[in-house]
Image (tube, helix red, strand yellow):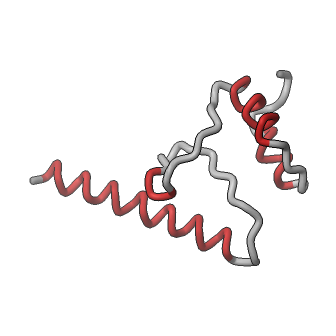
Amino acid sequence: MGKAPAYVGAARSRGSDPATANAAAMLEACGWRLVAVPAADVPPSALVIDAPAADGDAERRALERKRDRLRRELAATEEQLG
């Protein structure tokens, strides 16, 4: 595709919002897939693109995702420890 790996994120930060089909094609060319999963199941390696929201909402959602991920990691660690 000839675009930098951060192309989608850079496009979003400039206010460009590619259509879903275009985003899927761009991501596929980079070895990614465009998928929808429940918010609680988003893996740490996922590229998360939040919907436009009121100020502070995006940061809050990011913090909630981080909290949920850390809770899952803690539960897995506690299970390993027995």
- At 74% from the left and 71% from the top, the residue drawn is 53
Q: Residue furthest bottom?
A: 55
Location of residue 61 by image quarter: bottom right
Residue 16 in the image: x percent, y percent?
Answer: 89, 50
Q: Residue furthest left?
A: 82
Indicate the quadrant containing the N terminus: top left, top right, bottom left or bottom right: top right
Q: Is residue 40 above or below residue 24?
A: below
Q: Is residue 64 above or below residue 54?
A: above
Location of residue 75 by image quarter: bottom left
Q: Is residue 46 above or below residue 69?
A: above
- At 69% from the left and 26% from the top, the residue drawn is 28
Q: Is residue 49 left or right of residue 4?
A: left
Residue 25 in the image: x percent, y percent?
Answer: 76, 28
- At 44% from the left and 51% from the top, the residue drawn is 41
- At 60% from the left and 73% from the top, the residue drawn is 60
Q: Is residue 20 left or right of residue 16?
A: left
Q: Is residue 64 left or right of residue 56?
A: left
Residue 4 in the image: x percent, y percent?
Answer: 81, 32
Relative to the observer, which residue lies in front, 6 or 52? 52
Residue 72 in the image: x percent, y percent?
Answer: 34, 57
